């Protein structure tokens, strides 16, 4: 079996469901990977190790108390540092927000937790997702840009410091860094995923972005995140299809 940090979302979640991998083992593997690589790649701005391991232990205990809570049970997910997280710094890559700690979670964060996921930490972003470049380094060639503004999220996924991370897109901030770092970036249809609790750039253009290494993982994460949210007026009440089933259909 590969090292836990090498697994995709689907592989890690499947291993946990089958009892071949523990959430604590996975979390420790990713944290060790971050310790080894992030001093040079600079993808992360906030990691609460104790909280990550505590949540992993809680997810592990839940497996013996009724089974997995959702499709990504025990899988750590990274967040671009513009997503509100209760009790965790949300600095938006800016000194202006250097001490800002929200008191509630973004809808996307709540849905990740509700599906059994673990918040691994906050990835660096360009300032307010639109300004000065972040310090993140392209893991394939340090002389090349990792792109932005979801630079930290893309670098973290490409370097296998996490299997999935959220970015955002207003004018290319998911697709561009995904391409530059050789991973999969999904910019969903406007309104498909709630933006409540995500620091805005342009209300009429902003979308939540998904950064992963496989198309199947993009489908898994979209399944977790998609759906109506009355807190976001741009998020309509429409049915959510089975994206894994739809993934194999090419009707365009």
Image (cartoon, rainbow, N blue to C red):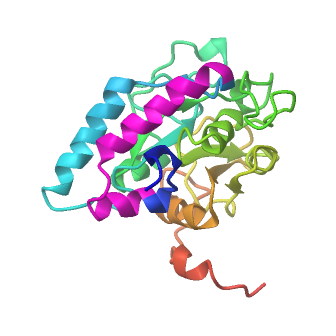
* In the depicted structure, whether residue 201 falls above or below residue 235: above
Q: Give left or right: position of 215 versus 21.
A: right
Q: Quadrant of the N terminus?
A: bottom left
Query: At 72% across and 32% down in the image, what residue appears?
Result: 129
- Frontmost residue, 156 versus 239: 156
Q: Give left or right: position of 34 versus 110.
A: right
Q: Quadrant of the C terminus?
A: bottom right
Majority secondary structure in the magenta region: helix
- Frontmost residue, 251 versus 56: 56
Let me know if residue 38 is in the magenta part.
yes
* In the depicted structure, whether residue 46 falls above or below residue 78: above
* In the depicted structure, whether residue 49 falls above or below residue 232: above
Query: At 74% across and 28% down in the image, what residue appears?
Result: 137
Let me know if residue 20 is in the magenta part.
yes
Q: Residue furthest left?
A: 65
Q: Which residues are magenta?
A: 12-40
Q: Residue 155 appears at what percent x and percent y? A: 67, 37
Query: At 45% across and 30% down in the image, what residue appears?
Result: 32
Q: Residue 111 appears at what percent x and percent y? A: 42, 53
């Amino acid at each position: 079996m590969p090292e836990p940090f090498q697994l995709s979302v689907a592989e890690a979640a499947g291993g946990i469901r089958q009892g071949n991998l523990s959430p604590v083992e996975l979390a420790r593997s990713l944290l060790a990977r971050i310790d080894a690589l992030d001093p040079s790649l600079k993808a992360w701005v906030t990691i609460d190790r104790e909280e990550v391991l505590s949540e992993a232990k809680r997810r592990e205990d839940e497996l013996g108390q009724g089974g997995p809570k959702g499709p990504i049970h025990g899988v750590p997910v990274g967040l671009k540092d513009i997503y509100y997280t209760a009790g965790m710094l949300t600095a938006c890559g800016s000194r202006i927000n250097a001490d800002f700690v929200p008191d509630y979670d973004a809808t996307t964060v709540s849905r990740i937790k509700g599906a059994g996921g673990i918040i691994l930490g906050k990835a660096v972003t360009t300032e307010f997702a639109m300004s000065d470049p972040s310090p993140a380094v392209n893991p394939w060639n340090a002389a090349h840009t990792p792109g932005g503004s979801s630079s930290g999220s893309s670098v973290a996924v490409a370097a296998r410091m996490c299997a999935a991370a959220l970015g955002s897109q207003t004018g290319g901030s998911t697709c561009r860094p995904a391409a530059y770092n050789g991973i999969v970036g999904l910019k969903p249809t406007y309104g498909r995923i709630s933006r409540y609790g995500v620091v805005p750039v342009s209300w009429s253009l902003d979308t939540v972005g998904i950064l992963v290494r496989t198309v199947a993982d993009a489908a898994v994460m979209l399944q977790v995140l998609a759906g109506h949210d009355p807190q976001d007026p741009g998020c309509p009440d429409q049915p959510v299809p089975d994206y894994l089933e739809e993934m194999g259909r090419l009707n365009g």
